[in-house]
Amino acid sequence: MTDKGGKTSRAQFATKLGVIATTVGSAVGLGNIWRFPYEIGTHGGGAFLVCYLFFIFVIGVPLICSEFSIGRSARKGITGAFREVSGSRWMGKIGFIGVLTALLIMGFYSVVSGWTMEYLFQSVAGGLKYSTQAEYAAQFDSFSSGAFRPLFWTLLFIAINYFVLVRGVEKGIEKVSNIMMPLLLLILIVFSVHSLMMPGAWEGVKFMFKPDFSKINSSVVLGAMGQAFFSLSIGMGSMITYASYFSADTKLGRTTLVIAVCDTLVAILSGLIIFPAVFSYGGTPAAGPTLVFEVLPTIFHRIPGGMIWSALFFLLLFIAALTSAISMSEIGISYLCDEFGMSRKKATLVAQGAIAVLSVLCAFSFGPLADFKIFGMTVFDLFDYVTASILMPVCGLLVAILGGWLSRKGFLADELTNGGGLRGRGVSLVQLSLRWICPTAIVLVFLHSMGVI
Ligand code: TRP
């Protein structure tokens, strides 16, 4: 791997565009296009959006700055970086939470990515031929409750991941992201304009943007926080790991803002595609995790050349999922390479193997294991809930405390200004948020949702 003047011979991203494309590629994924619409749909619309935006900009942005600073200064994956920046072996051990979170998320993320592959396949094979959300819901049900097909796509997705990952950071990941991310944005814009021109579209827009504050309760707030963490890829070390491949002159603050804005934009565009269509066709916004797989085909079915649009859309969604999945797998791989001195190839094999095992449980959660419940949830729902509502916030809290309190004096200012070379507007705001706002908000939301306060 190349070394462009870094402190060690660690791999580095080749270009500035590569840095943006890979980090945005990590953030923009199923979280924006699959998870965001169903979360906002089940949590009653506008009120959820307001909470979500609050968490993105007041907590998310400072946390990414902190993850970036930690990762680039240590040039290690999450456990090594936690240890180095805090100077405590214990913090390093605690960082393992991030590796665990990544594994659990990848368990269900691979399954949903597999669904996008099935829908890509069905678009081409002419299988998406119904016209209502209810019919597509039934079709989805019969597909996901099977055993072979969901599992086949899930494992294929993990295998594709493997092949991109073994090629390494700059060759595998950067190239894919550079081309596909801009294309995805373009197609989202086309479709949201199309959706907005449907009769009755306005109801969908109102549902999304008109906040009904009486609907805010702890599940909405906790849900919004989890979604913000998930969507921005914070709270498990993806951004720490990627920042360890940044060069000394990467502008951390600017990169963070680009990520936050692009990520939010994609989520909102995706909502603007889904909700006008839901209301226009008389469907239901609260369908849960299957929402986009029920609503998108109804849109494609009705437009001329729908098959081609549909194939293109699911292809891009698949790529978006892949670039995010890669950033998650990279956490484990970097951990195994750094801490156990494994070769990249072996580490990739071990990480993807572990993910494959967990993903089988998730893929079967809709079929053979649908009745296997832990705390009243299927394995799929349990992994989603535990990661978004517990592990990511806990890890986010650690990142805030580490960046705000436990690092050496002037750490954030040094990193965010590249050692004084940049003006560093906003450093004090980031610091303020990391020290006080993030910990307070995360702990409050957490305690409230547990019923303690
Ligand atoms: N942000 C991605 C999405 O929206 C998912 C993701 C990738 C992620 N890396 C992460 C979530 C790290 C949490 C932490 O689909």
Image (spheres, grey):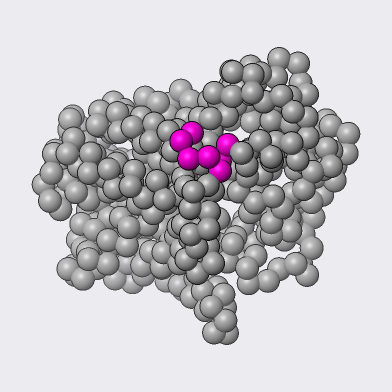
Position of 160 with respect to 291 (left or right) is left
Residue 190 point in image, percent of width and height: 69, 26
In the current view of this chain or complex, which residue is farthest to the left? 341
The residue at the point 85 percent across, 46 percent down is 203
Residue 320 visible in image: no
Position of 260 with respect to 402 (left or right) is right
Residue 51 point in image, percent of width and height: 64, 61
Q: Magenta stretch: residue 183 in it?
A: no
Quadrant location of the N terminus? top left
- Is residue 416 placed above or below 196 in the rendered structure? below
Quadrant location of the C terminus? bottom right
Position of 144 with respect to 328 (left or right) is right
- Is residue 420 placed above or below 16 in the rendered structure? below
Q: Nearer the viewer, residue 158 or 46?
A: 158
Q: Magenta region: which residues? A: 143-149
Residue 306 visible in image: yes
Residue 93 point in image, percent of width and height: 22, 66
The residue at the point 43 percent across, 41 percent down is 110
Report which quarter residue 80 is drawn in.
bottom left
The residue at the point 71 percent across, 68 percent down is 216
Figure disc tally: 0
Q: Nearer the viewer, residue 134 or 330?
A: 134
The residue at the point 60 percent across, 60 percent down is 224
- Is residue 184 placed above or below 145 in the rendered structure? above
